[in-house]
Amino acid sequence: MNDGAVRTAERVLDLFQGARLTPTQRRIAHSLVQHAPSAAYLSAAEVAELAGVSQPSVTRFAMALGYSGYPALRRELRALAGPRPADGGQAGDNPMQRAVRVEAQHLGRLVEQLDNLDAVEQAAKLLVASRPLPVLGLRAAAPLAAYFGYFAAKVHPDVRVLDNGGTHLLDRLDQARAAGATALLAIVLPRYPRETLDTLREARAAGLAVVAVTDSAVSPAAECADVVLPAAVGTHLVFDLHTGPMAMAMVLLQAMCDAAPGGVQHRLEQFEATAARRHIFEA
């Protein structure tokens, strides 16, 4: 997104803040935010196809927000969006350049979002205090969960990465809770595995605080989380780009280090001493 599109997405997101939406309605809201401002010029049928829901669901969504129907909501969206935009790239860009340029714009939006660190600091305090710390990431989110877990283990005494689904997943969550876990970090990326969302609900029911790094404040994970840290994903290639969520995850890890500086420094010194003794690295 360019700067204008980012501002439009933020204004569209404001329409949904505080609304009590069903999971289906959250999917519609998420699609409208992700594709703002062009979504403001789509029909109800086109929005339904974009969100993967039925056309009547789009009408019910508009009415849940207080509009007489989807046409009234679309008029509001068009007022927020302004004239229908052209492609967000620059003249002469090839498709790969456009994809990376949009990703850079996502990072620019993240920079602005981090003007206020309250949510990041709240999440860091919850996670750094949890012993052990379970980190959930399934399917597309599994590599990011493992990446976060690799570095978090250098500053946290007991990180447990839950990156495999199946019948053992909830067992491992129960084991972490029984061992003293008080919070869960979840990396939740499109297309939002059902098993991930079910696990978040189980975690909440078990009394764990849930921190979600996800692609949008109206992601399906938001309704299951105590703290939501949104970072947009790139959608201009065959497979999504996850640069934003990776950056957010590492910002969160930095905030965890800042929340417990003494213990972090001690563990880092221990690791460096061990690495030197075992000759782990060439440089």
Image: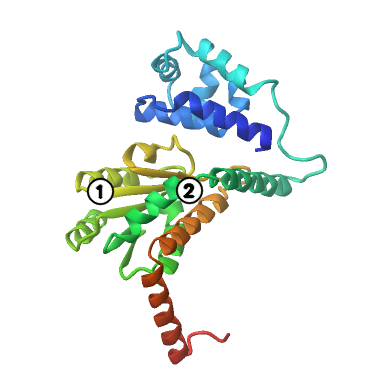
> Which residue: 31% across, 61% down?
133
Three-letter amino acid code at disc 2?
Leu
Residue furthest out toward the top: 68
* Render colour scheme: rainbow
Q: Tell me which corner region of the image, top left, top right, bottom left or bottom right, holds residue 257.
A: bottom left
Residue receiving disc 1: 203
Q: Tell me which corner region of the image, top left, top right, bottom left or bottom right, holds residue 152.
A: bottom left
> Which residue: 20% across, 44% down?
205
Tell me residue 216's x, y (percent): 48, 39
Dot 1 and dot 2 residues touching (CB under 8 Å) = no
How packed mark 1 is, by other alpha carbons closer than 10 Å (few <14, some 14-19, many 20 or more), is many
Tell me residue 61's x, y (percent): 42, 19
Residue furthest out toward the left: 178
Q: Can I make out residue 164 in this image? A: no
Q: Nearer the viewer, residue 73 or 165?
A: 73
Tell me residue 25's x, y (percent): 40, 26
Three-letter amino acid code at disc 1?
Ala
How packed mark 2 is, by other alpha carbons closer than 10 Å (few <14, some 14-19, many 20 or more), is few
**256 to 262, vertically: above or below:** above
Q: Which of marks 1 and 2 is in front?
A: 2
SS at circle 2: loop
Gap in angstroms between the C-alphas marked 1 and 2: 25 Å
Q: Which of marks 1 and 2 is nearer the N terminus?
A: 2
Residue receiving disc 2: 117
Tell me residue 55's x, y (percent): 45, 18
In the picture, which quadrant includes the N terminus? top right
**64 to 29, vertically: above or below:** above
